[in-house]
Image: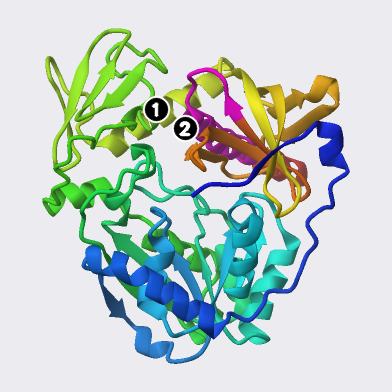
């Protein structure tokens, strides 16, 4: 998938019309049928199947559908499960750019900014449920999984369930991540895909439970590990490119500690600083070609990197300080390339400058619980996305740095700052 890119100065971008809020459209039955037809070859090729649990409690009434986000296949899978039930779909602003965005509106999609507080989104979801009388499909992770586990979920989903008062259904897929993992440069693998569809709460059950209990229900549903599932079920991905791009997830060498010198190519992951090499087998596990294997399981390696980043934050040594190319989005008519700039990320959050000093954007460390970072973003490059409900800034690093580390740092810094804030509030009250 690509996005329309226009070359513009920052001054020209400032003159562009801003995105205007529109009420969600009721999904077109015709377009829904077209999407289901278009999805059919993929569903057939992946031998897609699904199981259900407690779905008799939902019946035909509109519900909130929370689906994990593994790959570009996800929407096709959703139509394979729920069609002809009509669904409004919460979609990112950048995904709805151009003519495709107009079609997506007719399909019932409504745009929102990733990881940005959007007060209109709740009313849009309620409008879809109550006025349009359609179910609503959301990907609560908002971004694709990096390491095969759930991207950090936002707080407040239990509160959302309370406000909506409709059945809540989760869809957790197996195999979709392995068919098209984000790190693997859009190379499709031949993997069977399935899903488990479950009503985790009815309106009556939502009334009886606390927000914390509802949050726990969602966290339990999203506590999956795709690489563990592949290993335990002996799901073979025996392709010669299975480790291509794996350095996007595993950017730090556990042997020598060097960052951004890893390379995933073919079936191997190599550190070019110390020349240690690991092979990735057909079941997604790693083994060193010589010496000890520090982390056979990829998510364990990723967790270790998280712990390293957290220690850097504690020590005050963490810093991202990079030249970037900047693309800006203010409406649904694509993105605007405004040239080069500079991005820093430290204990205070993000600071982006560019356009000869005219662009000076700061984003605090507690702005969001995670970061919009992506690999091979719209086939352009790895990206770090920041911004608010008016301006989205997509920063493409000029040098070989890890956007995964930036996401880990954002998440850990947010948790640390929130804990400190709660402690301060408790002491103040005392």
Label 2 crowd (10 A; few <14 / some 14-19 / many >=20): many
- Look at the image and give the residue range highlighted in magenta: 396-419
Q: Position of residue 80 (x, y in %)?
A: 35, 74
Q: Secondary structure at mark 1?
A: helix
Q: Residue at x 43, y 31 (%)?
A: 306
Residue 401 falls inside the magenta stretch: yes
First in sequence: mark 1 or mark 2? 1
Question: Circles 1 and 2: CB distance less than 8 Å?
Answer: yes
Q: Dividing the picture into quarters, in which one does residue 171 lie?
A: bottom left
User: Mark 1 = which residue?
Assistant: 305
Closest to the observer: 250 or 316? 250
Position of residue 293 relative to residue 107, above or below, is: above
Label 1 crowd (10 A; few <14 / some 14-19 / many >=20): many
Q: In the visual, does 308 lie left or right of 284?
A: right
Closest to the observer: 272 or 126? 272
Q: Secondary structure at mark 2?
A: helix
Closest to the observer: 74 or 204? 74
Q: Residue at x 80, y 24 (%)?
A: 355
Q: Position of residue 357 (x, y in %)?
A: 84, 21
Q: Position of residue 220 (x, y in %)?
A: 38, 61
Position of residue 377 relative to residue 70, above or below, is: above
Question: What's the distance in space between the residues labelled 1 and 2, CA to CA?
Answer: 10 Å
User: Mark 2 = which residue?
Assistant: 404
Residue 97 falls inside the magenta stretch: no
Q: Residue at x 81, y 40 (%)?
A: 13
- Residue 269 shows in the view: yes
How many labels sit on residues? 2
Q: Position of residue 97 (x, y in %)?
A: 64, 54
């Amino acid at each position: 998938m690509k996005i329309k890119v226009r070359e513009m100065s920052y001054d020209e971008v400032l003159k562009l019309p801003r995105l205007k809020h529109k009420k969600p459209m009721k999904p077109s039955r015709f377009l829904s049928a077209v999407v289901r037809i278009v999805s059919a070859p993929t569903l057939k090729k992946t031998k897609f199947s699904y199981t259900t649990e407690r779905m008799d409690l939902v019946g035909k009434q509109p519900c909130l559908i929370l689906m994990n986000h593994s790959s570009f296949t996800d929407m096709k899978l959703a139509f394979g499960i729920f069609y002809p039930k009509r669904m409004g779909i919460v979609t990112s602003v950048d995904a709805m750019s151009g003519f495709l965005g107009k079609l997506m509106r007719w399909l019932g999609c409504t745009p929102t900014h990733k990881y940005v507080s959007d007060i209109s989104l709740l009313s849009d979801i309620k409008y879809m449920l109550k006025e349009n009388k359609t179910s609503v499909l959301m990907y609560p992770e908002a971004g694709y999984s990096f390491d095969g586990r759930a991207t950090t979920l936002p707080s407040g989903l239990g509160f959302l369930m309370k406000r909506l008062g409709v059945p809540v259904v989760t869809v957790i897929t197996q195999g979709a991540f392995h068919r098209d993992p984000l790190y693997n440069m859009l190379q499709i693998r031949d993997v069977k895909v399935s899903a488990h569809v479950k009503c985790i709460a009815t309106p009556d059950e939502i009334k009886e439970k606390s927000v914390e209990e509802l949050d726990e229900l969602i966290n339990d549903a999203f506590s999956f590990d795709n690489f563990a599932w592949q290993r335990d079920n002996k799901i073979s991905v025996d392709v010669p490119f299975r480790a291509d791009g794996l350095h996007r997830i595993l950017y730090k060498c556990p042997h020598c500690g060097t960052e951004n010198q890893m390379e995933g190519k073919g079936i191997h992951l190599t550190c070019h600083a110390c020349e240690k090499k690991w092979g990735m087998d057909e079941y997604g596990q790693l083994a060193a070609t010589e010496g000890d294997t520090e982390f056979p399981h990829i998510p364990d390696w990723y967790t270790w990197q998280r712990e390293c980043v957290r220690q850097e934050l504690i020590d005050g040594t963490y810093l991202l300080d990079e030249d970037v190319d900047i693309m800006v989005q203010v409406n649904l008519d694509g993105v605007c390339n405004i040239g080069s700039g500079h991005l820093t990320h430290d204990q205070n959050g993000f600071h982006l400058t560019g356009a000869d000093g005219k662009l000076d954007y700061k984003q605090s460390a507690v702005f969001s619980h995670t970061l919009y970072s992506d690999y091979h973003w719209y086939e352009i490059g790895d990206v770090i996305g920041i911004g608010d409900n008016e301006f989205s800034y997509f920063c493409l690093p000029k040098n070989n740095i890890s956007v995964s580390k930036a996401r880990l740092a954002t998440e850990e810094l947010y948790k640390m700052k929130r804990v400190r804030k709660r402690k301060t509030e408790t002491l103040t009250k005392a």
